[in-house]
Amino acid sequence: MPERFTITTPIYYPNDRLHIGHAYTTVAADALARFHRLRGEDVFFVTGTDEHGQKIEDRAGKVGKTPIAYVDEIVADIRDLWQVLGISHDDFIRTTEPRHERVVQEVFRRLEAKGDLYLSQYEGWYCTPCESFWVEGKLVDGKCPSCGGPVARLNEESYFFRLSRYAEPLLKYIESNPEFIQPVSRRNEMVQFIRQGLEDLSVSRTSFSWGIPLPQDPRHIAYVWVDALTNYITACGYLQDEERFRRFWPADVHLVGKEIVRFHAVIWPAILLSLDLPLPKVVYGHGWLLLGEQKMSKSRGNVIDPRQLVQRYGRDAVRYYLLREVPFGADGNYTEDALILRTNVDLANDLGNLLSRTTAMLERFTGGTIPASGRSSLRQQAEETVGRVEERLARLQVSDAVAAVFDLVKRANKYIEEEAPWQLHRAGDPRLGDVLYDLAESLRVIAILLKPFLLDAPDAIFRQLGLGGAQDASLADAAWGGLPAGTQVQRGEPIFPRIETEREGEAAATKAPVKSAGNTLPANDEADMISIDEFQRLDLRVGTILEATPVKGADRLLQLTVDLGEPEPRTVVSGIAEYYRPDALAGTQIVLVANLQPAKIRGVISHGMILAGKTAQVLQIVSPREPLPPGTQIK
Ligand code: ME8
């Protein structure tokens, strides 16, 4: 029997449309689920919706709908969103389903049978957006300590769960299972919280009706958090399919946002202890996506719609950004600029160019046939990358795992520069075959390792390598050497076209000198000025000089070989020989006018012109302040 892996997301409130904060958790859980499937494990990945409670009842009332009609619409929208993002959940649980209502009622019976349920009076505060009870002393300036929103005074009859009884057993459990609450900072918070002592928890309400009635007293409805947390065992088959339940429970990972770790790492395990059920292996509380300084949240209304981003940039770009940008566990700022930059640099430039350069060189040098390989220079790094991805995902370091794959992408790009296959080709060097095989095989391994994270790119890479789709490839197939010699590559479209932004126009505008009274700068005549459109006709790009050699019979000229991120480097003739020694130029970054008509200079065809500043004494090549990927456009 294969190993099994159970992973859950929070079940989201369908009180409003979801935003990229929810997509963040769900895409991360999806990546982990896909990774374990890639390893051949039997995965159970569950997400769903938390549909009861006062918040939903109030919200539905406000728009004149019944709660169920209200949530039905939003739940349909949520299911559609997960489809748009390619989420591969095995179950979608709604707390309004009969299978769940039965389990919640039985849980209440069992808590009572255990002596953990008693009737009393709740007097204190309630935060409806968080669906949380608070004692006076915990409020901050009279507001909810979790979301900062207003709280309401409650005074009603309620059943209580003897949470206080479980403080000691919980502390012991946390101590002997250091993996249980992650990251460590959240574990420390929880330990501190429990050490202060746990009060019994109010677990029923009588002042509204949208929820599951307690079997022992139907005037009371189950506190929505007890209802919601129970979803995890319902989905695994508790009290319905004991065999399935034994197989999939306890969950390996409850992935949640940091604000609800308390419910998952204190209340939920206490309930499970009372039910004599095993506790989840890991509760991981990740950080927040912020918009400016603030948490993106439905109640604040400062939200970004993931669907729009997918429409604009594609699902792989959005998934990549969510998985890669913020170190998993920490908070991070969302900006669309960062999404565009990630896409252009990592996906279009690094990954996309590696594929297009590799397939272009194969077409040119071998007629598109994957050559046989003798010695490999990338094998070791590729093998280490597989290990690194496994090890990082085992520790739920999702962004670091993605970064490990892109380190291999970068290494392969560097390898092209180092080995200069076009020179090997020119020289008839037999190492050409080894180098080209290395590149194509690395791409195959990269595509497999990307399968948990990206959905379309791995297939596209496989197809361009002549391997059909990537859907059947498993992690075992990432072993080096799986690409058969003789395979015919099929060069295709760029897998990630660069995203051109509307702001290009603005950037160009800032380059125009500002005319003002008393301006001492040389003022341009209107007639001398060019329009943005004219400026934009210039294709200025960053390049890296690979090699510089003197041009025979011309003292002032150097012949440069420049990497512009294209399949083959460019030859450029430049009048800088009096200022730079050829051997000092390799590795220097330059700015090239890339769409200049080719010109023959002293018998050498020059494809472009590099920019430099010149005074009477010196000449300085224009370089970006910090290195940029070859091919980066200057705007
Ligand atoms: O809390 N950044 O549901 P919810 C990162 N129904 N993640 C975010 C986020 C942000 N800005 N905003 C939301 C509930 N999330 C309960 C859960 S579970 C038994 C019941 C994600 O709709 C994150 O995972 O308020 C957070 O914990 C969850 O959405 C809250 O979703």
Image (spheres, rainbow, N blue to C red):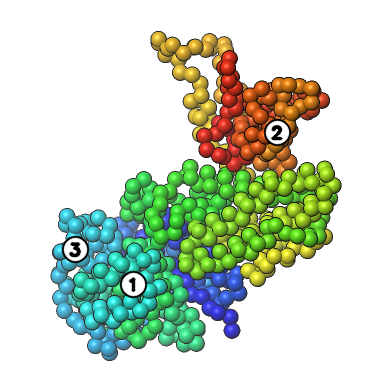
Which one is in front, 385 or 43?
A: 385
Query: Image quadrant for the N terminus?
Result: bottom right
**Residue type at mark 1?**
Ala
- What's the mark number on residue 548? 2
In the rendered image, the vertical position of residue 315 relative to residue 234, given as above or below: above
User: How much space separates mark 2 and mark 3, taking CA atoms?
Assistant: 69 Å
Mark 3 falls on what kind of element?
A: helix
Q: Quarter of the image holding residue 222?
A: bottom left
Q: Of marks 2 and 1, which one's residue comes earlier in the chain? A: 1
Indicate the position of residue 440 as horizontal and vertical percent values. 72, 56
Q: Residue at x 55, y 39 (%)?
A: 627
Disc 1 target residue: 265
In the rendered image, the vertical position of residue 425 relative to residue 315, given as above or below: above
Q: Of marks 2 and 3, which one's residue comes earlier in the chain? A: 3
Indicate the position of residue 514 as horizontal and vertical percent values. 45, 18
Mark 2 falls on what kind of element?
A: strand
Query: Image quadrant for the C terminus?
Result: top right
Q: Quarter of the image holding residue 554?
A: top right
Q: Where in the image, quadrant-wise, is ligand 1 located?
A: bottom left
Image marks 3 and 1: residues in contact by CB distance under 8 Å: no
- What's the mark number on residue 138? 3
